[in-house]
Image (tube, helix red, strand yellow):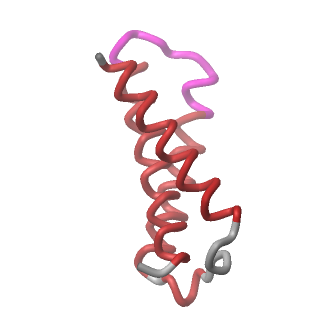
Amino acid sequence: MASSRVFWISFLVLGVSLLLNVAVKLLGGNRSLSIIVMCVSGLGIALVGLYGVVRPDAAGGPPAGSPLTYGAVISALVFTVGLGLELL
């Protein structure tokens, strides 16, 4: 799999995880400004990630072996695992 595709899939996973986190917090009764900001940022990250997954040539991405790719993968993984632990 190409490095740019991995980068954009990580962005998409992070955005979807943020949106799921917002849904969990809203179902728990938390309705604050920070939840609205998290919802808007999660939606933006998910949409950018979706565009990159659908059109990787147009979106570009970091070169192979870039620390930016590793950072995106690690942040998506850590946030998703954190969300899973919060749901338990």
Q: Position of residue 3 (x, y in %)?
A: 53, 76
**Front position in the image: 76 or 19:** 76
Q: Residue at x 42, y 41 (%)?
A: 17
Dividing the picture into quadrants, the one containing residue 65 is bottom right
Tell me which segment is drawn in magenta.
26-37
**Front position in the image: 49 or 44:** 49
Q: Is residue 23 above or below residue 6?
A: above
Quarter of the figure with the N terminus: bottom left
Quarter of the figure with the C terminus: top left
Left or right of 80: which side holds 7?
A: right
**Front position in the image: 80 or 74:** 74
Q: Position of residue 45 (x, y in %)?
A: 55, 54
Dividing the picture into quadrants, the one containing residue 82 is top left
**Front position in the image: 65 or 4:** 65
Q: Is residue 66 above or below residue 75?
A: below
Q: Is residue 30 magenta?
A: yes
Q: Residue at x 47, y 75 (%)?
A: 5
